[in-house]
Every structure is written in C-alpha cells, then in structure tokens.
Image: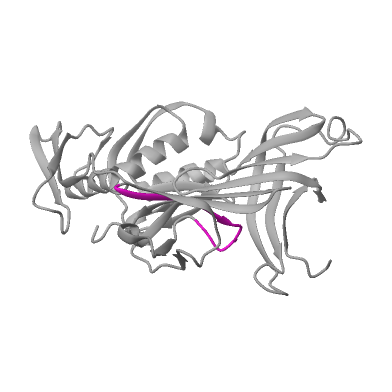
Amino acid sequence: MSDARRARANVRYRGRIHHVMDFSYTDNYDKTDDMSVQFSDRDERWLNEWFPDTGETLDVEIEVLNWNSRGDNRTLSLGTFEIDNPRHSSTMSMNGVAAPVTSSARSEKKNRSWKKISLSGIAGDISGTAGLALVYDTDVDPFYDVADQNDKSDLEFLEELCKSDGLCMKVTNCQLIVFEEAKYEAEPAVVTIEKGRTNIIGDPDFNRNAKDIYKACEISYFCPKTDETYIGYFAVPNAPDVGHTLRLRGNYNAESDDINLDRKARARAREKNKYEWTCRITLNGDITYFTGTNVEFVGWGRFDGKYHIDVVAYSNSSSGFDVTLTLHRCLEGY
C-alpha cells in the first residue's frame, strides 16, 4: 500500500491537518487565488468547537506520492487562505481566498487622491496596508501627478491602474504581485502536451475567435493641463494587411506629464487579440502546472504552438486527482 500512486490535499487548521473529503483550488493568472474544501464531521466537532471564527486561516498544500514512478514524491505549497463562507450540512464546507476577507484593501470602497507617486509606490502602500509582501516584477513604472481613487477598494483601484499600462496584478500566498504578461509569454515552454502521449481526460476544447481581432490600435487623449490632444499608436507585428484598427478615446483617472499612449495602445491591442486562439484541457493531476508559464501543443494541427496558462484548476476527490488548464496562444512580438 505504501507504494500506491496517490494524491492528497493537506489542509492545516489551528495547528493540525484535518481529513479532507473533497478539495479544489484555482490559480488565477490576474485575479486572487481561491479554494474550497469539504471536511467529514461525524462527531460534529466542526459544528461546535472547530467552527471557524472571522479571520481564521487555512494552510494548504497538495502532496503526490509515487506519482510518475515509485519514489516520485512531491509537495506543492498553495499558501495561506482566509476562510470565507463556512457552511454545514452533515459535512463541513468552506471557501478560502488568498486576499484577506477582513482586509479593507479588498472590500472597503475609498475616495482619495494619490499625488506625485509612481505605480510601484501605490502598490507598496496598498500591499503594506493589506499585510501583503509586494513583488513588483516589471520595469514599467508610470509616475502620476495625481491619481484619483473614486469609490473603489484599494485592490480594484490598483488593478485598474495596472491594466491601463498593460500590467497584471494578483494576490497569492500572502503576496501582491505586479507583472507584465508579455514578458512571461516570451519565456520558453516548460511542458509539452502531445496528442496521443500526454494523459488527457476527455477531449480538449480548442477555439479560434476571428471576431474583434485588430491589426493596430490608436488612442487619442485630451490633456486638460496643456489643452492639447495627443495620439498613441501601436501596429501589431506581422499582422495581415486586412483587418481593422481599434480606435479609442482615452479617459484616465490619473494625470501625468508623461502618459505613454503608445504603451497604452499596445496594451489595448494585446487585450483584444490575445484570445484569438484558446484552449481548455483537463489532464491527470500534475503539480507541475502554474499560471504565468507556457506549454507547447504538438500534434493538434492548426492549434499547435506555444500557449500561456491563464487558469489552473486542481480538483482532488474520491473520483481522482485532475487539473484543468485554460490557455491562450502566446502573442509574438508584443
């Protein structure tokens, strides 16, 4: 029995690991990670002394034993999650979120102005308030004369600023991470998913969306400080001659002497075009998959190529351990 191939979720609560019946975890690329878990409760201790108080947490890891071969034992730490929505019906179920539920950064709407500050400075202030470590993994760092936060939580506001300049933001494992997706897409693939060889469950769902795909983006912006209109433009590399130009009018809630409209045009083009080629696929559980990494599809005809992982969803229950990936094909040159 000790050599059996198996996987389990180890969920630690109040210093001890509890028996898990069902478990799922979603690693979202540019959103907060979340999980759900179901515990057995024959003696009703979860209904009484173990029932979680507001602000309590779960420490979670996935462990695989003898997975690809005898002695292939690995552990993937998923981090700490604040308990949300505990519920009981013969068993105890609860959700967990990587961004603290009780933190004002996630839920409290605020109105304030940030003055003479960079994006990394705003991210540092917000992460510090939320009790999160900041990982600012990009050279892009816009500076704002004034950035107005209007009826938004801190995390909503920061996400809005990041998106405006083509950056992504997520909260995971007690960290707030700001990063550039194009930089990660340029990395080599870490795994190959080959038709007929990789352990796939069911059939993958490939899709090509030819609608709303653009060859260029143009953004116009009227600056109230100079009383002039500025134009930003980005041409998609290797785009076909046919196609449309996405034309937008900028309306930013931040003032700056150096709004990089070309960078913003590039960000809007990426935002529209990155979902032209997509895939959703379920495989036998493997803890080597992470969002923000790339995989190579081989043997799938026109859908072959390097894809970027947007969502990783792990599930472990009595029916087995599997992982579902949601991906888009990496954009070339931008």
Residue 75: quadrant of the picture = bottom right
On the image, the x and y values in percent for residue 330 come to: 33, 57
Left or right for 77, reference 296:
right
Q: Quadrant of the N terminus?
A: bottom right
Query: Magenta region: which residues?
Result: 276-290
- From the viewer's side, name the closer residue of 193 and 126: 193
On the image, the x and y values in percent for residue 180 come to: 36, 55
Q: Report if residue 282 lies within the magenta region.
A: yes
- Look at 72% across and 74% down and name the residue there: 70
Q: Quadrant of the C terminus?
A: bottom left
Image vertical order of residue 244 relative to residue 300, above or below: above
Image vertical order of residue 195 relative to residue 39, above or below: below
On the image, the x and y values in percent for residue 181 come to: 36, 54
Left or right for 129, reference 304:
right
- Look at 23% across and 39% down and name the residue there: 211
> Residue placed farthest to the right in the image?
43
- From the viewer's side, name the closer residue of 290 and 139: 290
Q: Report if residue 20 lies within the magenta region.
A: no
Residue 297 visible from this viewpoint: yes
Left or right for 167, reference 285:
left
- Look at 23% across and 61% down and name the residue there: 333
On the image, the x and y values in percent for residue 247 come to: 14, 37
- From the viewer's side, name the closer residue of 155 and 328: 328
> Residue placed farthest to the front in the image?
196
Residue 281 visible from this viewpoint: no
Image vertical order of residue 50 relative to residue 199, above or below: above
